[in-house]
Image (cartoon, rainbow, N blue to C red):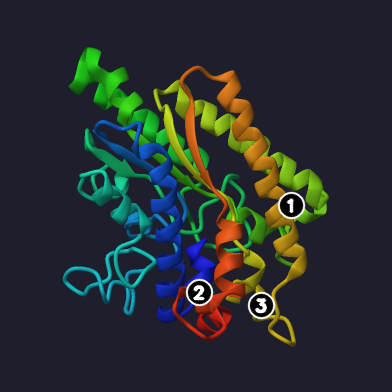
Amino acid sequence: MASFFMMRSSASSFSCSIFLSFVLLSFCAVSRAQSSVPGMYVFGDSLVDVGNNNYLELSIIKADFPYNGIDYPGGQATGRFSNGKNAADFLAEKVGLASAPPYLGQPNGVFVKGVSFASGGAGIFNTTDESLIKHTIPLPHQLGHFSTVRQRLAKELGSHLEDHLSKSLFPVVIGSNDIINYFNTGSDASQKYSPQEYVTLMVSNFKELLKGMYGLGARKFIVTGIALIGCAPKVRYPTPTGECNKDVNYWAKKYNDELTLMLHELKSELKEFQYSYFDTYGVFTEFIQNPATYGTDSNLLQWVQ
């Protein structure tokens, strides 16, 4: 997601700060049920990537250059698509953990206290990066990495494995790049599916991936919806007026609607499945329409041009 929002350092600050707000709010919904969180296993795209793409030699989606990291401890770019810490970092702090390290930085690690599989530019589908030579880690591959980590955890924790994973948090931030890819001119997806068919396919595939995580021991999920990605610079820039793309925003909202129904289904289908969902679309809409409420009298869309 951040791969198309973060075209300037100001955009990084904007998207990171808003995303941080709703992730922490999401966590508040589950924090009362958490006596302790032993680990955090992060899945998703650039909003929670802590440096995995740095280890992808062929990837053109990286954040290893200024002004990324300018406000991070040490002032250096770390691979986070942000001027400083990202939401995954702050969420780890909230539950008393160190930031989850990038999986590719320690491919043989055990990661008892957690790890991040997130990758800038990633999507629900393996083919989401088809329009660019950008080489990401799509969500199905992230799940594969988690399966590998789980095997190591089983050797390390033995009979305590299930309890450890059931108490750990599993943030999943994904979907924006899939929608953006669909609306890229001439994309294969748009040739094969109507927008409604594509959104439904996104949700059904995501459901199977969440069930895969559940099958490996995950129980407590933080799932985020898609924001107003039709207002992202990558989408607005090609238009003559620079206005938000209403079609993209419409289908982002439709995806969110189907996503919430799917999560409700999983809650009834899977024993001990717990989730916290946050309406990212609604948060961005509120920030954009009522900037004065949040300490600025300017149009927030001007910050991400």
Residue identified by numbered label 3: 236
Quick one: SS at disc 2?
A: helix
Quick one: SS at disc 1?
A: helix
Q: Position of residue 179 (x, y in %)?
A: 66, 56
Tell me if residue 155 can be seen.
Answer: yes
Q: Residues within 10 Å of mark 1 (few under 14, many from 20)?
A: some
Q: Residue at x 46, y 56 (%)?
A: 22
Q: Position of residue 285 (x, y in %)?
A: 61, 66
The kind of residue tagged 3 is Arg
Badge 2 vs badge 3, beta-carbon distance below 8 Å: no
**Which corner quadrant holds the C terminus?**
bottom right
Q: Residue at x 79, y 52 (%)?
A: 195
Residue identified by numbered label 1: 189
Q: Nearer the viewer, mark 1 or mark 2?
A: 2
Q: CA distance from mark 3 to mark 1?
A: 21 Å
The kind of residue tagged 1 is Ala
Residue identified by numbered label 2: 293
